[in-house]
Image (spheres, rainbow, N blue to C red):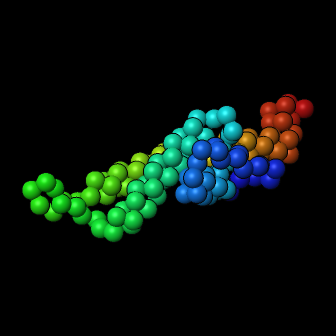
Amino acid sequence: MPEEGYTVPRPPSHLRKAGKTLWRAVCGDWHLEADGDDIVILALACEAADRASQASAELKAHGSLTTHDRFGVVRPHPLVEVERQARAQAAQLVAQIQRGQTSFRRLELATERQARVEARAAQRKDRRGGGRARLNG
């Protein structure tokens, strides 16, 4: 979840409804820098989501998931494959962003943990009077 003061970057104007919905969902869950690589990847994922949505709408208008070739053989409608590939691409790209966010969060947690360990060690050292210097005193 993004921290306080984080404003969700505006989605690109060329995105359609499905793309803008995905944009807001991802940006609402993760902190993405407006000029970072994740924003570029997210834009690609949103474009793929729009493409899948558009293919789905076209299939719905067609009324069937199949079509007949010139010999009368029933074949899957070409838009079925377009929709499938676009959805897979969107999912892959969002997963790529998620992996990056998870790695970054792990690094933040490790850094915070190390700072706490060092602070406790400094406190113990202060309580003991600085170690060997006390024994020589």
Compare residues 109 and 12 and report the one nearer the observer. Answer: 12
* Residue 129 x %, y %: 87, 39
* Residue 5 x %, y %: 82, 50
The answer to whether 21 is drawn above or below residue 126 in the figure is below
* Residue 37 x %, y %: 58, 35
Name the quadrant of the N terminus.
Answer: bottom right
Question: Can residue 7 be seen at all in this image of the molecule?
Answer: yes
Compare residues 74 and 21 and report the one nearer the observer. Answer: 74
Question: Can residue 114 be seen at all in this image of the molecule?
Answer: no
Name the quadrant of the C terminus.
Answer: top right
Compare residues 83 and 72 and report the one nearer the observer. Answer: 72
* Residue 56 x %, y %: 41, 61
User: Residue at left 43%, top 62%?
Assistant: 57
**Residue 12, quarter of picture:** top right
Using residue 94 as the reference point, say whether residue 81 is left or right of it. left
Number of labelled discs? 0
Compare residues 98 and 42 and report the one nearer the observer. Answer: 42
User: Residue at left 71%, top 46%?
Assistant: 9
Residue lying at the far right of the rendered structure: 137
Residue lying at the far front of the rendered structure: 70
Residue lying at the far bottom of the rendered structure: 63
User: Residue at left 22%, top 61%?
Assistant: 67
User: Residue at left 80%, top 53%?
Assistant: 4
Residue lying at the far left of the rendered structure: 71
**Residue 71, quarter of picture:** bottom left
Using residue 118 as the reference point, say whether residue 135 is left or right of it. right
